[in-house]
Image: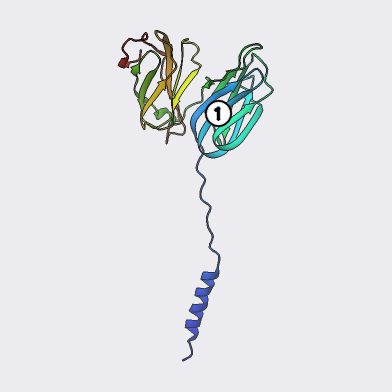
Amino acid sequence: MKPSFLAVLILLIGLAICASPVAVLPAQAAQVSFTSSPAIQAADQHSATITWSTNTSSNSRVMYGTDPNNLTQVAEGTPGTKHSVKIDNLQPGTTYYFQAEAGEAESCGVRSFSTPAAGQPPITTPRVAPVVQKCTPSAEQQKLKITNGPMLEYVESASAVIAWSTNAKGSTRVMYSTDPNNLTQLAEAPWGAGGLTHRVKLQNLQPNTTYYFKVETGQAQGLQGAEVESPKVYSFKTPPVGAPPLRNQAAH
């Protein structure tokens, strides 16, 4: 029996559909957001290295200058999620202002660092890049809050554990030093490691010494990279060697 015309037509249509290429829509790229704020990794009289991290791979760029309102110079680094940009040809003893960029995202606010003066030692330990011009928070960013703490969970002669909580996951950073007006040392924990509870251990402290600190949670999940810091500078004093540690005390 010969196949009917309708059956042949259906067969040909089926073969045509199978042979035609299928359009595959490209996966939508994840929106880039900062998962840690920019820090000064190292600096000498003529160069500085700025580091930060993002949630997805993107390019690395720093806009900088000696005028916080005129960041006209640019330095770039290798793309990735761990960003490191080295700025060269700087002048000794000079304050520079910068903003980090990754893809279409940029760090919140203009930050600053100073190169060591001639004859001064280089900066070899990471330190906070202080914000000199804060960004204007959006309605979403204003929702990020510190809900408890900071608390001094444990303080002994050479170390301290500081904890606080927020209403959203984010970075966990403590800026500290023995000078309340110059919090240049940085201690941090992995982004989102403790959920809504943030906990940082400060190490290599001196016994019987007063330290000052502020806590910061930034690049909050679901809140457009919002940042929040403690409203004031807190302090604690390490016990002398051999003295019992302090436990679970509110920071003042």
Residue 68 visible from this viewpoint: no
Classify 78 as above or below 108.
Answer: below
Q: Amino acid at mark 1?
A: Thr
> Residue 198: x and y, percent?
38, 26
* Residue situated furthest front in the rendering: 242
Residue drawn at x 54%, y 60% is 23
Residue drawn at x 60%, y 25% is 49
> Residue 77: x and y, percent?
62, 33
Q: Is residue 126 left or right of residue 159?
A: right
Badge 1 element: strand
User: Residue 210: which quarter of the image?
Assistant: top left
Residue 50 visible from this viewpoint: yes
Count of numbered badges drawn on the protein: 1
Colour treatment of the image: rainbow
> Residue 163: x and y, percent?
36, 22
Classify 192 as above or below 211.
Answer: below
User: Which of the image's four quarters has the C terminus?
Assistant: top left
> Residue 12: x and y, percent?
52, 77
Residue sitting nearer the eye, 131 or 150: 150
* Residue situated furthest bottom in the rendering: 1
Q: Residues within 10 Å of mark 1 (few under 14, many from 20)?
A: many
Residue sitting nearer the eye, 202 or 106: 202
Residue sitting nearer the eye, 67 or 54: 54
Residue drawn at x 51%, y 25% is 135
The residue carrying mark 1 is 51
Q: Is residue 99 left or right of residue 247?
A: right
